Amino acid sequence: MKIAFDFQFIYRNIDSFVWGFIKTLEISLLAILLALVAGFIIALLRMSKQPWLSLPAGGIIEFIRNTPLLIQIYVIFFGLFTVGIDFSAFMCGIIALGLHYTTYMAEVYRAGVESVSRTQREAAAALGFNRMQTMRLVILPQAVANIIPPAFNEFIAMIQGSSLVSAIGVMELTQTAKMFSERTAATYESFFLISALYLVLNSILTTGSRFLENRLTAYR
């Protein structure tokens, strides 16, 4: 049996999918911001020479990275409500997605920092720089070029992972497609359209990553 692809369905309902696309962008960008900031803090704790800081940070990283994101979304969504914290599903999705990828960003930061030669630290110490000055003025500027490619990979993974917040009712792209699929039986059209939108968004990020990587390489 041949199934016709209804382009008119996409034209008639494009506004709803654009709204879902905007929600996906909002969730992803806020989660990325959370992961960037919290990941840097966790990375600093993980690299600390004090075991009472590095060991808990390492434990948090291992625990979150080795449990499914979907389970973490459910735990935060239902767990916060149980203890009397009434966050919206949208906010819970951002928190869960951001915290999950915080651990991946922490490892990206750590790998980038550790890729800088030890002689750079020794030279900074010889110049009288303290630990924070060495990190800010010597290590991080050199580590950025090594951090950008894997960081953008995590951003792309976050955008794809944002589809899981549909499980708690957030009306982003995937939930929008599910709704139209159930109400109109336009399954192919709905999921083809959101696949194309995800592809466009991730392609933009990939292009941006390559552009920044090439620019930074040119200045080395």
Image (cartoon, grey):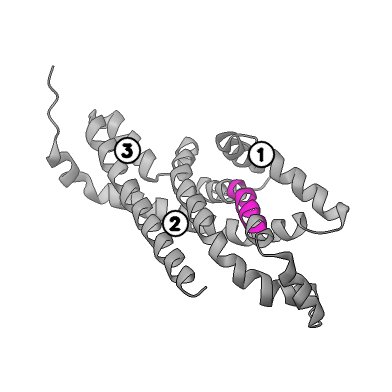
Residue identifier under label 1: 79
Along the viewing direction, whichever of 209 and 142 lies nearer the viewer: 142
- Amino acid on which the number 1 mark rests in the picture: Gly
| Residue 58, x across and y down, in percent | 75, 47
Indicate left or right for 103 with 5 as reference: right
Looking at the image, is 185 positioned above or below residue 22? above
Residue identifier under label 3: 177
Q: Earlier in the sequence, mark 2 or mark 1?
A: 2
Indicate left or right for 66 with 193 as reference: right
Badge 1 marks a residue whose secondary structure is: helix
Along the viewing direction, whichever of 50 and 68 lies nearer the viewer: 50
| Residue 113, x across and y down, in percent | 67, 62
Looking at the image, is 4 positioned above or below residue 175? above
For mark 2, does the 10 Å Cα neighbourhood hold few (<14), some (14 to 19), or many (20 or more) residues? some
Q: Which residues are magenta?
A: 100-110
Q: For residue 26, which numbered disc appears in the image? A: 2
Residue pictured at 39% horizontal, 65% vertical? 211
For mark 1, does the 10 Å Cα neighbourhood hold few (<14), some (14 to 19), or many (20 or more) residues? few
Q: Quadrant of residue 146?
A: bottom right
- Amino acid on which the number 3 mark rests in the picture: Ala
Is 109 contained in the magenta span?
yes
**What is the distance, in whole Å, between disc 2 and disc 1 at their CAs?**
23 Å
**What is the distance, in whole Å, between disc 2 and disc 3 at their CAs?**
18 Å
Indicate left or right for 115 with 12 as reference: right
- Amino acid on which the number 2 mark rests in the picture: Glu
Badge 2 marks a residue whose secondary structure is: helix
| Residue 25, x across and y down, in percent | 41, 55
